[in-house]
Amino acid sequence: MLSDFLRRVWPAACADLSRLRGPGYRGASALSVVRPGRAEPSPFCRMSRRFTTPAGLECDLDYFLEWRPYLWRRPVLWAVGDPAWLGGRRVLEIGCRYGRMSCLFGLMGAEVLGVDVDAAAIPRAMREVERWQVGDRVTIRQISGDLAVLRPQTFDLIFTKSVLYWVRELDAMLDSIDALLADGGRVAFVENWRGADWMMALRRRLLHRRWMKEAADFPGIRASQLPLFAERFERFEHRRYWHLVIAMRGRKRSPAISGQPATDHSGPLRSTGL
């Protein structure tokens, strides 16, 4: 049968999909239970659903990913990297939606500002902040979409998930993101990947048919747009997953490369004007 064939040739994918139906998947709860006979929770930096915060709280990564965790888990882990680096860092999440990833960064010790243009999502994100008791480290704000309201050269990490692929003027958006990075700051982008024309035709048949009447209109990061990222961030790397998601990471170019003078903006996030 087809299912038996897939288990033989694609065991990792089938293992991920099986979790959606099995008792181990708890989409409504972030707390993870270590079952008898199983290994202890792995650190966040490893390919595992479970992780332990610096405060000792055992959590389920899938909860913070919000939707389709089997697609986003590995790309997010790769793009963000070692969570130990987050402690004490200043993080900006653009398009924070319901605030779960912002709360995750706060739980890992970062000082976080989550922004979104959707006014309806902000109250729910605030409730997540209260639930996880990270109000001293996580701030949620609504913005109009103009990042110029934030103080430049402020953030050590700027993170997006399923946001940039909607942006029509991507080059201008990336310039704004670059301006917000502190010296040595990092970017971690996890976005929808448009893929080749044949893949788009297949997806139009199988997925989101009402959203994809024309493959050419489907938003997604294209291969032709990758140079826009590489031109702005040094050590730029990217990986594609399942022909559906692309993870990208890089660093702010040094002043010697960019020609900009080094400036110290080490003040607290609360003074960004938001």
Image (tube, rainbow, N blue to C red):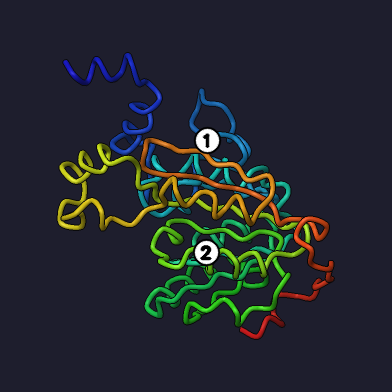
* Residue in view at x 79 percent, y 67 percent: 260
Give coordinates of residue 218: x percent, y percent: 28, 55
State the residue position of label 1.
48
Picture layout, residue 15 above or below residue 145: above
The answer to which quarter of the image holds residue 132 is: bottom right
Give coordinates of residue 61: x percent, y percent: 50, 46
Q: Which mark is residue 21?
A: none
Where the N terminus falls, by quadrant?
top left
The answer to which quarter of the image holds residue 136 is: bottom right
Give coordinates of residue 93: x percent, y percent: 56, 64
* Residue in view at x 44 percent, y 52 percent: 191
Residue 147 horizontal side relative to residue 181, left or right: left
* Residue in view at x 51 percent, y 49 percent: 226
Mark 2 belongs to which amino acid?
Answer: Asp
Q: Say whether marks 1 and 2 touch (CB < 8 Å).
A: no
SS for callout 1: loop
Picture layout, residue 49 above or below residue 145: above
> Dot 2: few (<14), some (14–19), or many (≥20) neighbours within 10 Å?
some
Residue occupying the far bottom of the picture: 273
* Residue in view at x 39 percent, y 63 percent: 166
Could you tell me if residue 30 is visible in this image?
Answer: no
State the residue position of label 2.
171
Give coordinates of residue 274: x percent, y percent: 61, 84
| Sequence-wise first label, 1 or 2 | 1
Could you tell me if residue 201 is visible in this image?
Answer: yes
Select label 1 or label 2 by which is in front.
2
Picture layout, residue 105 above or below residue 153: above
Residue 162 horizontal side relative to residue 230, left or right: left
